[in-house]
Image (tube, grey):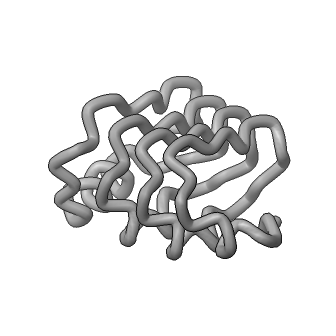
């Protein structure tokens, strides 16, 4: 599910997309000011689409369908985001 119109809201610092049946993280590339992103209780199977969110401080992806903790850790390390302080990832499939 792609949330239409997010690419126009480039000054968002907080976004809660919890409980939306989202399967894939996409369409957030221009939201580079995001500091807090909640995707709690969706159908996301892997972390992706966060490469441009370098100011992200809080990421909540708990209660999704993420299956590989190893892949998730490698992806987050690759992002090399020095601002990420809080990762809520409990209750996934791994």
Identified at 65% across, 30% down, the residue is 63
Residue 24 against residue 14 in the figure, above or below: below
Total marks placed: 0
Judge whether 76 appears above or below 29 on screen. Answer: above
Q: Residue at x 55, y 41 (%)?
A: 14
Of residues 28 and 65, the one nearer the viewer is 28
What residue sits 40% from the left and 35% below the top?
A: 58
- In which quarter of the view is residue 25 placed? bottom right
* Residue at x-position 37% and y-position 48%: 56
**Residue 49: percent from the left, percent from the top?**
50, 69
Q: If the image is split into quadrants, where does the N terminus sit?
A: bottom right
- x and y percentages locating residue 84 in the rendered image: 27, 41
Q: Nearer the viewer, residue 41 or 50?
A: 50
Q: In the rendered view, would you say 70 is above or below 92?
A: below
Q: Position of residue 48 (x, y in %)?
A: 48, 65
Q: Is residue 59 left or right of residue 65?
A: left
| In this picture, residue 43 sits left or right of residue 9 | right
Percent position of residue 73, x then y: 28, 49
Left or right of 84 on screen, residue 49: right
| Most foreground residue, 61 or 73 | 61
């Amino acid at each position: 599910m792609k949330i239409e119109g997010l690419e126009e809201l480039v000054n968002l610092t907080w976004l809660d997309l919890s409980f939306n049946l989202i399967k894939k993280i996409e369409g957030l590339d221009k939201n580079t000011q995001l500091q807090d992103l909640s995707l709690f209780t969706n159908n996301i199977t892997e972390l992706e689409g966060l490469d441009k969110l370098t100011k992200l401080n809080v990421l909540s992806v708990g209660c999704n369908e993420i299956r590989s903790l190893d892949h998730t850790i490698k992806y987050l390390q690759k992002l090399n985001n020095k601002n990420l302080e809080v990762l809520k990832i409990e209750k996934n499939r791994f």
